Image (cartoon, rainbow, N blue to C red):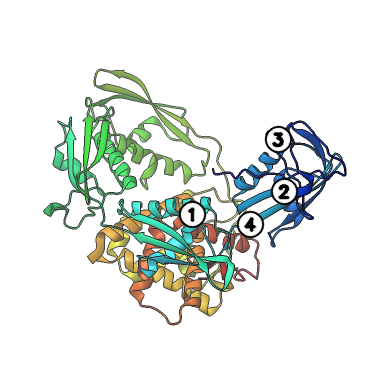
Amino acid sequence: MRYRLLFILLIFTCISSFTAKGFAQDNDSTEVGQKPVILYNGTPKKYEIADIKVSGVKNYEDYVLIGISGLAVGQTITVPGDDITSAVKRYWRHGLFSDVKILADKIEDNKIYLSIQLKQRPRITDIVIHGVKKSEREDLMAKLGMAKGTQITPNLVDRAKILIKKHFDEKGFKNAEVNIVEREDPENAEQVYVDVNIDKKAKVKVHKITIDGNMVLTDKKLKRTMKKTNEKGKLINLFRPKKFIEERYEEDKQKIIEKYNELGYRDAQIMEDSVSQYDEKTVDVYMKIYEGQKYYLRNITWVGNKVYPSDLLNEQLRMKSGDVYNQKLLNDRISNDEDAIGNNYYNRGYVFYHLDPVEVNIDGDSIDLEMRITEGPQASISHVRINGNDRLYENIVRRELRTRPGDLFSKEALEQYDQPLKEAILTTTYRLARNELAVKAQYQTYEKKLTPEERNIFIDIFTYTSKILTNTKKRDQAEETLEALNRIIKDNNGLKTWALGMSVKYKAMLERAKERKSAQYYRTVVYNDIIENSAAIIADGTKRAALLDGDRTDLFKFDWSQFDE
């Protein structure tokens, strides 16, 4: 960091000539009002700070600004020395000042009177983003971390550049260029306009995928396993995404390993991989795979089970001695399938159940599994509460909530909110999909607290989302949306906070729009929010959910100003 060396000016006014080691002065040249001068080749001297004055900053109290310096009245400092230099560095590290000076107004005996002169960094009058569409500008504004009225600092600018680059990197624009420029505000000398100039360049796509070491699975099968990383120019990938996104590529690598595990190759791994630039618009992907050997199940033993006999558990597992060691099937039969072993326990009140499959012996290509079960006690329902039941969804809710106080806990009866959306929703009608989204979002629990306008907003959100999911012409987009929604459900036990957060942004958009835009525009906004901005959306939804849980009547008295342009 650039630090300015500041000079404390010390001049001793004497009636008679005075000479001190390291100091030189000419009394005849000293003018009225001239500040004392310190020569840095002189001998350091200790002074007690008698007073500190601050100038140049309007928006902070003096005691706050003085506190930043680390200096205080009554403190003994050495001049020249590190005390003043350290104080200046503290101001620079704070990031809010473009110029710092610390001067000595006067010196009396061993007392020094300091004057701290600061120049504040300008505040932002407005932020203008160039080079992208309006919908993208709205997304970027929510990520920038800059807002009108805030001070602009180098750290803030650097962070904004990083976030914008990351935003476009995730969308496949890996060569995007970002330049942030400050323009003086002619009407306010202490404020600036901020221009964010973006050149997205072309999307980076995959030119070629090269795979080495595979014998069991062909290149074609492995490339088909990779859902999001596909070569351009191939007819087979006509309707598949071709852009290269690092995160999606990592997911596809995991899909390859899972495919091998499903076929019994438990030791399979990607030994090395690389992504190299082919040309300005494309990259080459290379992977070297170690397949290992194929494994089979030899013995399956059950330990700790008392509720269900081992024979019944073996039947439910649907895996037997001699079968391929299919780890995907094993996990599905333990916990993922509707009739999985775990669900049978949970539906009988065994909420503390746990099953841990342990490979106790590996002999050649054979594996012995020990299925270690902890059943625990049964749990009962203490209370069942339904808030805000609505007539549109009442039948659905009451059909699903078949629980009463005293009943044994049943996962099946309570899982409608936190279970993932099934792929079948992609082929249903948008109206049925909309109803399912509303149930997952627990809309019935807060509907009665909404105004008619706000109810329409929620219905719009569910409608636009369901039309994305059921759009057969854009199946990739639909699948991507389904995947993102299921991640939200998994992380938040449903879509409640997501829906509440979406309503915040949607209402703000409507309030500042001069006229309602097309349905396609809002579908695009909803899609981008689901894919790219779910974390920020859920954060806003969490605030509203907290008000809901407190049964607050001022639920929708929300601070919308943070979304203003």
The mark that comes first in sequence, 2 or 1, is 2
Front-lying residue, 41 or 216: 41
Q: Which mark is residue 119?
A: 4
Quadrant of the frame with the N terminus = top right
Residue annotated with mark 3: 81
Please identify, in this view, whether the residue under mark 3 or under mark 1 is nearer the observer: 3
The mark that comes first in sequence, 4 or 2, is 2
Find the residue positioned furthest to the front: 28
In the image, what residue type sits under mark 1?
Answer: Val
Residue 554 at x, y percent in the picture: 65, 70
- Cα–Cα gap, marks 3 and 1: 34 Å
Front-lying residue, 562 or 20: 20
What is the secondary structure assignment of the residue under circle 3?
A: loop
Residue count near mark 2 (Cα–Cα under 10 Å), binned few <14, some 14–19, many ≥20: many
The mark that comes first in sequence, 3 or 4, is 3
In the image, what residue type sits under mark 3?
Answer: Gly
- Cα–Cα gap, marks 3 and 2: 14 Å
Q: Are marks 3 and 2 in contact (CB under 8 Å)?
A: no
Front-lying residue, 550 or 314: 550
In the image, what residue type sits under mark 4?
Answer: Lys
Residue annotated with mark 1: 157
Q: Are marks 1 and 4 in contact (CB under 8 Å)?
A: no
- Cα–Cα gap, marks 4 and 2: 14 Å
Residue count near mark 4 (Cα–Cα under 10 Å), binned few <14, some 14–19, many ≥20: some
Asked whether the viewer can see residue 401, the reply is: no
